[in-house]
Amino acid sequence: MMRVFGVFGDPIEHSLSPSMHNAAFRALGIKGCYHAFRVSRPRLADAIYGAAAMGFGGLNLTIPLKEEALRLESLEVDDLAREIGAVNTISFSADKGEGGAEYRIRIQGHNTDGRGALLALQGAGVRVRGSRVLIIGAGGAARALAYSLDREGAEISIANRRVHRAHDLAASVGGTGFSLSDLDRLVSQADVIINATSVGMREGDGRIIDGHLLKSHHAVFDIVYNRETELISDARSAGAVAIDGVMMLVYQGAEAFEIWTGRRAPVDVMERAVRERLEKRRRDEVGG
Ligand code: NAP
């Protein structure tokens, strides 16, 4: 029987997850289909319990539902997702009663964003343990990165526009918080530089850091994935390792896929599907 998977969010029209997961199902011959569902915050509980009752294979959650999910009474949230304060992946499993009768559906919450980022760095050959990692940003994605990289033994500094958020996040992972005016010095001291702000999403956003500060010994990771940012092109020009946000998107999806299916995710297929979709979107925009 065909299993249904999906992503819930609002807005949701631009999600790349359906292309990515459907390509993975096709490549492995899994009978699954993945859809995007517009679900508003007040409807989240109904939507998740409904999906559980209908036998969905798994779910992703995106803006604005990741934090909201923690309020759900019957969601069993794993340690990392609880630390991060956000759930982006939900899995369902049936507890069996006597004689194999299904008597309860367990709904479990995970966060694969940080692990996705870690795998993107490792996939590019970047060593995290013991490295000095500068995270710029202190929003939801930065939180996932900070907790996951801390678990991996990175030495973390966090710089953010609203500096109190940098201090709060840094304190919770044993790192140090700074304001954006400290960036020149912080960049020169870092091995790995991560943009976890939304700067770069739109053409004309400008640069979160001056390109001249980047050197060939740096690894630069920009988690923005909808376009090639100035940060990524500056990093390439400097001869630094440059990693774009597509790889985090793909690896967070691959982690979710493996949780749901128990199968190794076809990462190359998923990456190709995302890049093709982005390319098509760019062509459509240029074409008006
Ligand atoms: P968020 O929770 O809204 O956080 C936004 C962050 O960006 C905050 O730190 C904010 O600083 C900072 N920021 C926004 N505008 C800024 C500006 N003009 N100058 C300096 N800092 C600015 O968003 P999020 O969920 O963390 O997402 C952040 C970015 O990551 C988005 O582009 C998103 O698409 C991307 N993302 C990528 C992946 C992936 O898989 N590749 C996954 C998740 C998110 P303040 O705290 O001072 O407001």
Image (cartoon, rainbow, N blue to C red):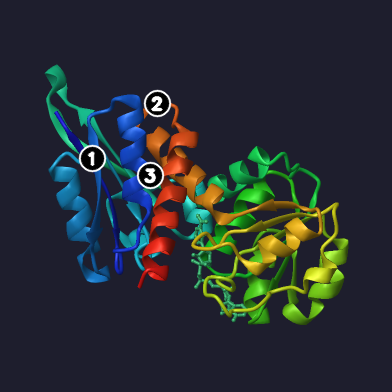
Q: In this view, does 131 lie to the left or right of 200?
A: right
Instruction: Give amino acid for label 3.
Output: Met
Disc ID at residue 174: none
Instruction: Give amino acid for label 2.
Output: Arg
Q: Disc 3 on helix, strand or loop? A: helix
Q: Which residue appears farthest toward the top when viewing the image?
A: 99
Query: Residue at 17% across / 59% down in the picture?
Result: 46
Q: Where is residue 226 in the image (x, y as percent from the top left)?
A: 49, 62
Instruction: Give amino acid for label 1.
Output: Cys
Which residue is tagged 3?
Answer: 20
Q: Along the polypeptide, which appears first: circle 1 or circle 2? A: 1
Which residue is tagged 1?
Answer: 33
| Disc number lying in front (2 or 3) | 3
- Quadrant position of residue 159: bottom right
- Quadrant position of residue 120: top right
Q: Where is residue 48 in the image (x, y as percent from the top left)?
A: 22, 53
Q: Disc 2 on helix, strand or loop? A: loop
| Structural crowding at the residue carrying mark 1, measured as other residues with C-alpha within 10 Å and reported as few (<14), some (14–19) or many (≥20) | some
| Pick the front one: 207 or 10 | 207
Q: In this view, does 27 lie to the left or right of 197?
A: left
Q: In this view, does 171 lie to the left or right of 34?
A: right
Query: Residue at 44% across / 55% down in the picture?
Result: 279
Q: Spatial distance from mark 1 to mark 2, Cα to Cα?
A: 16 Å
Residue contact between numbered discs 1 and 2, judged by CB atoms under 8 Å? no
Q: Which quadrant would the C terminus be assigned to in this image?
A: bottom left
| Disc number lying in front (1 or 2) | 1
Which residue is tagged 2?
Answer: 263
| Pick the front one: 197 or 282 | 282
